[in-house]
Amino acid sequence: MAAPDRMDRVVNLAKRRGLVFPSSEIYGGFRSTWDYGPLGVLLKRNVKDAWWRSMVQMRDDVVGLDSAILMTPRVWEASGHVATFTDPLVDCRNCKERFRADQLPDSGACPNCGVKESFTEARHFNLMFKTFVGPVEDDASVAYLRPETAQGIFVNFPNVQTTTRKKPPFGIAQIGKSFRNEITPGNFVYRTREFEQMEMEFFVPPEDGARWFEYWCEERLRWYVDLGIPEDQLRLRPHETDELSHYSAGTADVEFRYPWGWGELEGIANRTDYDLTQHATFSGQDLSYYDQEHDRRYVPHVIEPAAGADRATLAFLLAAYDEEEVPDAKGGTDRRTVLRLDPRLAPVKVAVLPLSKHEQLVPLATEVADMLRPHFMIDVDAAGSIGKRYRRQDEVGTPLCVTVDFESVDDRAVTVRDRDTMAQYRVAIPELLALLRERLG
Ligand code: ATP
């Protein structure tokens, strides 16, 4: 399938099946903002849960945090965001459209109206959303919506370190909303002004920074592959020296081959001791660590894998989207759409389908559904032909369907149908839960 088609079809499927809706849609939408619908919220939550499981639960050297979105503006002065978190903004003098100067085509033509050399001089535009805290709107009450979750981690370094008694190397992980007043949001949920980040700051002895940077690059790439993105659609792109932030001793992006080209999924940076040193200076607090074993004091260096939950969700959707010809019941062929999502990411794990709404089948289907509900996210669907219902589950990636038919009433067995192979097999109801658990991994 051609790449632009894939994007259109995924966006269309997302809207049609309640994965992602345009925000404020009844008012005509609102500037590239999106709402995750009943299936989308499950998918994105599964992405975040998979990240949390691999970054926090499965490790004894990383702990979690949930810091506030609003922080004192001093934080953003210390971090450098007030002074330098800017994009170069240009206006087209002809059509008045605004663009990022670093994203203009080489031709010099306006991407909107096509007029050449019509741009104003670039000026710095700060991407932080400003607001006021309290009833008075003056300079003293200015606050910013955080543009990254990382700073909430840095300022809590001493709190977390002393309460958990972790010693470097150790990390602090956080998932949460961030806000950037992007000049040109777009490509669906790829670039929005409100988005969710999954960030981890890993504090290490200064001499170990380079080694841990390599480690996290490999580890993070592996995470996407493990959850089903084919390796040839992923790459690790080290930043050129002129791309590096002033404090970075190395940055690499995990990139995904989006339909419009390679795009960043996640940035992995060696931030050195920059952030802790800045916050120590601005706050007047000592943020160094005393290493008792070697009787020395140092400011830890930080390796940061920073991922976006929305970009990852979109990448998993795009990689999973498939259309294929399959045999139909009448000996012909039929076309089906199937989301080949890893079962861990699938919004619904099991669909329970009574063959019809017949009074003998519905109570048994309800019994089966009630048995499974505490263990998996399930869906019960009794409307329409069974073939159509299988297709509806396929296109939202439900790995397994359980069909209750008239024989089930006598033999207390059901048919389990596999999304990818479409193979069907009969399973006794008392053995169903164990089998589904095994199949779902
Ligand atoms: P880009 O170059 O695409 O603007 P960035 O390098 O500024 O991204 P980081 O500051 O490294 O991004 O943020 C870490 C991650 O947060 C990104 O890899 C991305 O997944 C996510 N992210 C950043 N900005 C946005 C956005 N506007 N919309 C959605 N996700 C975002």
Image: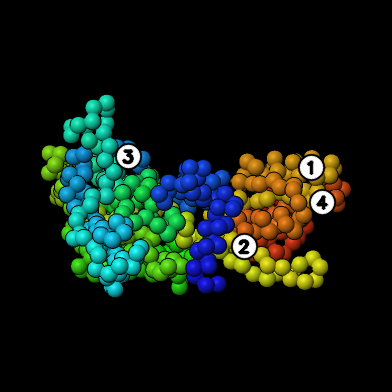
Seen at 25% across and 60% down, the residue is: 93
Q: Amino acid at mark 4?
A: Asp
Q: Amino acid at mark 3?
A: Ile
From the viewer's perspective, tell me whether residue 408 is left or right of residue 119: right
Looking at the picture, does residue 301 appear above or below residue 2? above
**Any atom of ligand 1 within 8 Å of the CB at mark 4?**
no
The residue singled out by tag 2 in the image is 338
Q: Amino acid at mark 1?
A: Val
CA gap, disc 4 to disc 1?
10 Å
The residue singled out by tag 4 in the image is 405
- Marks 2 and 3 close (CB-CB < 8 Å): no
N-terminal of the pair, mark 1 or mark 2, is 2
Nearest to the eye among marks 1 and 2: give it: 2
N-terminal of the pair, mark 2 or mark 3, is 3
Q: Residues within 10 Å of mark 4 (few under 14, many from 20)?
A: many
> Which label belongs to residue 73?
none
CA gap, disc 1 to disc 2?
27 Å
Circle 2 sits in a helix, a strand or a loop, which is it?
A: strand
Nearest to the eye among marks 4 and 3: give it: 3
- Marks 3 and 1 close (CB-CB < 8 Å): no
Measuring from the top left, give residue 351's x and y in whole percent.
Answer: 68, 50
Q: Residues within 10 Å of mark 2 (few under 14, many from 20)?
A: many
Q: Amino acid at mark 2?
A: Val
The residue singled out by tag 3 in the image is 69
Nearest to the eye among marks 4 and 2: give it: 2
Specify the quadrant of the image occupied by residue 234.
Answer: bottom left
